């Protein structure tokens, strides 16, 4: 049972480059989320989606874009990478009921140099 | 403005003893609380949760207590085992709206010594 799968696990980018972090889930969850975790900090919400075609900003959306064309996939795009985006990125999904926890992928460690 | 606070960055306990991890929150709209456990190079794993209509929830060795008046919750692990060594995150959310966004604390690193 795969759960939430994130690719790549590691990536080094140069300033100004762009890339897409992939996230897919096989649990048929409608709700999906992207978080970033900086060293010594908690997870902060970047974007979330409550279903295919519906996305909304979280706490720290600047410099990122998302799309949700299918229930399974929720890619996160960095258009112009900046050093401040060096972080570990986690994707999560959950059912649409209030007492359901979010399930996380293993993260993508991204360094911008 | 940190709405969920874990004031102890680290905690060390002996195997077999009790581990108590604490969490405070400031947002009175929060009505559902979760604890996640995270090992290095892995994603957070859901551990246990509690709704604001309860003051205690147990699952095996793990018990979460909620004190709404003090806006405080704690996770008790009894007995502690070396495999419990991990970072523990407290998270909270409000049922208002329908997105169930989580607000996380900074985490507490628990080390259980054999």
Image: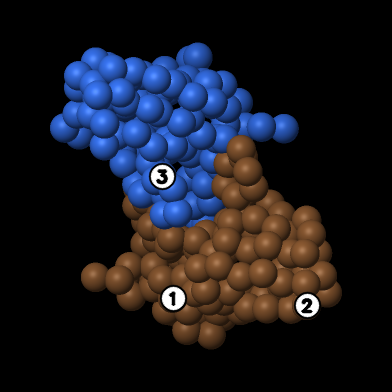
Chain colours: A brown, B blue
Q: Are marks 1 and 3 on the same chain?
A: no
Which is in the foreground here, disc 1 or disc 2? 2
- The residue shown at (45%, 54%) is B41
Between A9 and B6, the one lying in front of the other is A9
Q: Are marks 3 and 2 on the same chain?
A: no
- The residue shown at (55%, 67%) is A10
Numbered label attached to residue A24: 1
Q: In terms of secondary structure, where does tag 3 sit?
A: strand
Drawn side of residue B38 relative to residue A111, left or right: left
* Placement of A104 over or under A38, stated as above or below: below
Which is in the foreground here, disc 1 or disc 3? 3
The residue identified by callout 2 is: A17
The residue identified by callout 3 is: B38
User: In what quadrant of the picture does the N terminus of chain A appear?
Assistant: bottom left
* Placement of A97 over or under B25, stated as above or below: below
Where residue B2 sits, quadrant-wise, is top right
Coordinates of residue A73 in the picture (x, y in percent): 48, 79
Q: In terms of secondary structure, where does tag 2 sit?
A: loop
Pointer 3 indicates a residue of which chain? B
Drawn side of residue A77 relative to residue B74, left or right: right
Crowding near pointer 3: few (<14 within 10 Å), some, many (20+)? many
Q: CA distance from mark 1 to mark 3?
A: 20 Å
Pointer 2 indicates a residue of which chain? A
């Amino acid at each position: 049972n795969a759960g939430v799968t994130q690719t790549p696990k590691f990536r080094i980018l140069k300033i100004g480059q762009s890339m897409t972090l992939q996230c897919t889930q096989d649990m048929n969850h409608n709700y999906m989320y992207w978080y970033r975790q900086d060293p010594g900090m908690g997870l902060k919400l970047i974007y979330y989606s409550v279903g295919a075609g519906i996305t909304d900003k979280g706490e720290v959306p600047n410099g990122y874009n998302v799309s949700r064309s299918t229930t399974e996939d929720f890619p996160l795009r960095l258009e112009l990478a900046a050093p401040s985006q060096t972080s570990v990125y986690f994707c999560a999904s959950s059912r649409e009921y209030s007492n359901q926890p979010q399930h996380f992928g293993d993260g993508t460690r991204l360094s911008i140099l | 403005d940190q709405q969920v606070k874990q004031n102890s960055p680290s905690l060390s306990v002996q195997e077999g003893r009790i581990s108590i991890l604490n969490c405070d929150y400031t947002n009175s709209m929060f009505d559902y609380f979760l604890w996640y456990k995270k090992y290095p190079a892995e994603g957070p794993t859901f551990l246990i949760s509690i709704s604001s209509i309860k003051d205690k929830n147990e699952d095996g060795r793990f018990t979460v207590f909620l004190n709404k008046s003090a806006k405080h919750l704690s996770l008790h692990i009894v007995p502690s085992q070396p495999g419990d060594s991990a970072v523990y995150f407290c998270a909270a959310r409000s049922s208002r709206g329908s997105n169930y966004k989580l607000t996380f604390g900074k985490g507490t690193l628990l080390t259980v010594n054999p």
